[in-house]
Amino acid sequence: MGTYVHFTDEQKYRANNVDLADFLSRQGEKLIASGREKRLSSDHSITVHGNEWYDHAVEKGGYAIDFVRRFYDLSFPEAVTMLLGGEQGRTYQPALPQKQEPKKPFALPAAHTDMRRAYAYLVKTRHIDREVVSFFAKQKLIYESCEKSKDGTKEYHNAVFVGQDENGVARHAHKRGLYTEGKAFKGNVDGCHPAYSFHHTGKSNQLYVFEAPIDLLSFVSLHPQSWQDHSYVALCGVGGQAMMKMLELNPQINEVSLCLDNDEAGHKASERLKNQLAERGYQCNRLVSQEKDWNEDLSSGQQNQSGLELKMI
């Protein structure tokens, strides 16, 4: 039998209350802001907020001790010891007490009177084809929001990418800040249904899957020929719920192209999604951008008109 390590209730409480963003940063992990949460750069499906974590790929979560056990493959005593700083006595910033706020019902952000900023950002800054933007805007799947700060003194403008259900009812919205200075805000609106993210449904047997709406729009801009015939979905992360909902609602689809980012997190998520598809009998391939993502390919293509070829693995 292994050695039994005793921790007092107070020690376990302190370990479970460690702020995970602070803890992970000290371990050298890179974190990406995602609304009120932070997302692991090495695994985009995992988000942390205070002492809580959630894995959107498997739809499981919990608190600090359980996270460290899973993420670092440690025993309970090893995880508690690590969180408490070990023999060196390092301590980590405790998470601020989290108020148990009731879940907000989903609602689309208030629309601005026009889409001038959204068009400028998507077409001029992101180089997305104007006709592609207009196609989705006319269907009310892309619009510009205008939201006021809590004190009412500031306005925030975002491009909003809407996901509708099979009855045409908005169930999901992803916001992207339109400011080119500094780090732009991006994140899903509270109360979103993850199975109905931004998408287009065609009549062919092909589905293309992306991490973000801008990646989807960039790919279509790069490969515009008969694009409306095919189906596309942006996961707004790396969870597979929206992909599976597209397949459920469109039985004509039997070929899926995974077009996630060309980085470690994108490759890891693609492998997981590929296994899910194989279990259900779908033909699957991986399309990889030349740069990190399809918008970088599109932007570099604006500078170099020699064109880009699809890379399949």
Image (cartoon, rainbow, N blue to C red):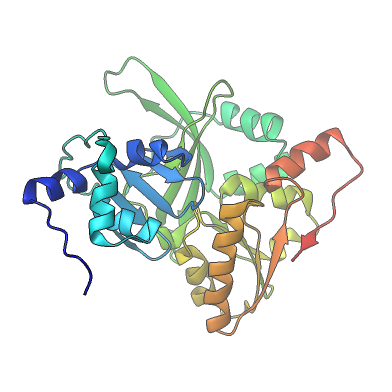
- Residue 31 x, y percent position in the rendering: 45, 40
Q: Nearer the viewer, residue 65 or 276?
A: 65
| Number of numbered discs | 0
The reply to whether residue 138 is visible in this rendering is no
Figure quadrant of residue 188: top left
Image quadrant where one finds the C terminus: bottom right
Q: Residue at x 41, y 41 (%)?
A: 27
Image side of residue 141 versus residue 55, left or right: right
Q: Residue at x 51, y 45 (%)?
A: 41
Q: Is residue 144 above or below residue 12?
A: above
Q: Residue furthest right?
A: 306
Image side of residue 231 versus residue 279, left or right: right
Q: Residue furthest top?
A: 153
Image side of residue 219 versus residue 181, left or right: right
- Residue 283 x, y percent position in the rendering: 66, 79
- Residue 171 x, y percent position in the rendering: 39, 55
Q: Is residue 296 above or below residue 81?
A: above
Image quadrant where one finds the N terminus: bottom left
Figure quadrant of residue 277: bottom right
Q: Residue furthest left?
A: 9
Figure quadrant of residue 298: top right
Q: Residue at x 44, y 34 (%)?
A: 111
- Residue 24 x, y percent position in the rendering: 38, 42
The reply to whether residue 285 is visible in this rendering is yes
Image side of residue 22 versus residue 291, left or right: left
